[in-house]
Amino acid sequence: MDDIEILEKLDKGQIDFNEAFTLMKKNREAINTAKGHFLKVNIKDGERCFPIVIPLFLINSGFSLGKAIVRLIPKDKRNDKLEEVCRILDKIEGRDIKRLVDALRRCKAHPLVRVEDGNTLVDISVI
């Protein structure tokens, strides 16, 4: 029974407040136990399909590592594109990536992004 049904029963007097509260609390526990573990990226280009599965715990570490490695490249060796990447990475806080990963972990299997361009399809989901 979802929250709306619970509230409707409460409104009609079919259940009391304590029952409604208990039922809604059980709904929250069910939501919190469903967890995503991987970010799946499927790239289909014509007949070829490239599935990429990334464990969520690696995203935060990979972001931090990537940010550190890019900073190690001397400024005189960077081209315009790398400079742009550095500016973007500097604007993204590590805690924001951690929050994003935590939100993805709370998701059950769910599609996030689907992009089609001609014969190319990119499908990103949490599994």
Image (cartoon, rainbow, N blue to C red):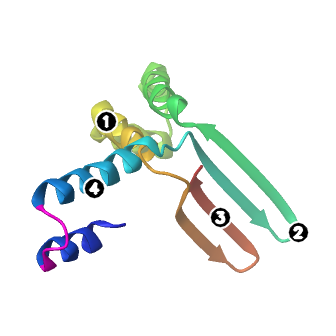
List the single residue furthest toward the front. 14
In three-dimensional space, the C-alpha distance between marks 2 and 3, rounded to whole angstroms, equals 13 Å
State the residue at coordinates (50%, 51%). Answer: 108
CB under 8 Å between callouts 3 and 1?
A: no
Q: Residues within 10 Å of mark 3 (few under 14, many from 20)?
A: some
State the residue at coordinates (57%, 56%). Answer: 125
In the image, taking residue 40 as reference, residue 1 lies left or right, namely: left
Mark whose residue sits in front, 4 or 2: 4
Please report whichever mark, 4 or 1, sits nearer to the chain's N-terminal start: 4
Q: Amino acid at mark 4?
A: Leu
Q: Amino acid at mark 2?
A: Glu
Please report whichever mark, 2 or 3, sits nearer to the chain's N-terminal start: 2
In three-dimensional space, the C-alpha distance between marks 1 and 2, rounded to whole angstroms, equals 38 Å
State the residue at coordinates (15%, 79%). Answer: 12
In three-dimensional space, the C-alpha distance between marks 3 and 1, rounded to whole angstroms, equals 27 Å
List the single residue furthest toward the right. 47
Nearest to the observer: residue 57 or residue 63: 57
Q: Which residue is mark 1?
A: 90
Q: Position of residue 99 (x, y in %)?
A: 32, 39
CB under 8 Å between callouts 2 and 3?
A: no
Please report whichever mark, 4 or 2, sits nearer to the chain's N-terminal start: 4
Would residue 19 be counted in the magenta stretch?
no
Please report whichever mark, 3 or 1, sits nearer to the chain's N-terminal start: 1
Q: Position of residue 86 (x, y in %)?
A: 39, 37
Q: Which residue is mark 2?
A: 47
Q: Which residue is mark 4?
A: 23
